[in-house]
Amino acid sequence: MKKRDEKIENKNKQELNNKEKMVSTVAYRNYYPNDKEV
């Protein structure tokens, strides 16, 4: 039971990290609209 909870927690953490990455990428694009690498 405990292992299952840990798995769910890790999954939630990963989703949070992905959201943060997306937000920071969008913010980066807003600050540097001419940077084509992102």
Image (cartoon, rainbow, N blue to C red):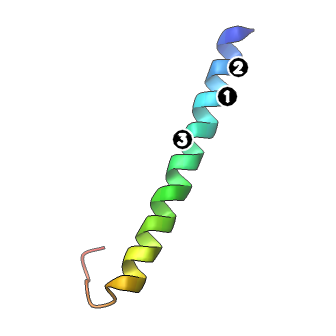
Mark 1 = which residue? 8
Mark 3 = which residue? 14
Where does residue 11 sit, x and y in percent of width and height? 60, 35
Alpha carbons under labels 2 and 1: distance apart? 5 Å
Where does residue 38 sit, x and y in percent of width and height? 31, 73
Q: Amino acid at mark 2?
A: Asp
Tell me, yes or no, whether the two marked residues, 2 and 1, touch with CB atoms within 8 Å.
Answer: yes
Alpha carbons under labels 3 and 2: distance apart? 14 Å
Q: Amino acid at mark 1?
A: Ile
Give the SS element for disc 3: helix
Q: Outermost residue toward the front?
A: 31
Mark 3 is surrounded, within 10 Å at the Cα level, by few (under 14), some (14 to 19) or many (20 or more) other residues, namely few
Label placed on residue 5: 2
Which of the 4 image quadrants contains residue 24?
Answer: bottom left
Q: Amino acid at mark 3?
A: Gln
Return the disc, 3 or 2, that comes first in the chain's sequence. 2
Left or right of 35, for residue 23: right
Give the vertical position of 20 relative to 36 (above or below).
above
Label placed on residue 28: none
At x 49% / y 64%, what residue is drawn? 22
Where does residue 10 sit, x and y in percent of width and height? 58, 30
Give the vertical position of 4 relative to 25 (above or below).
above
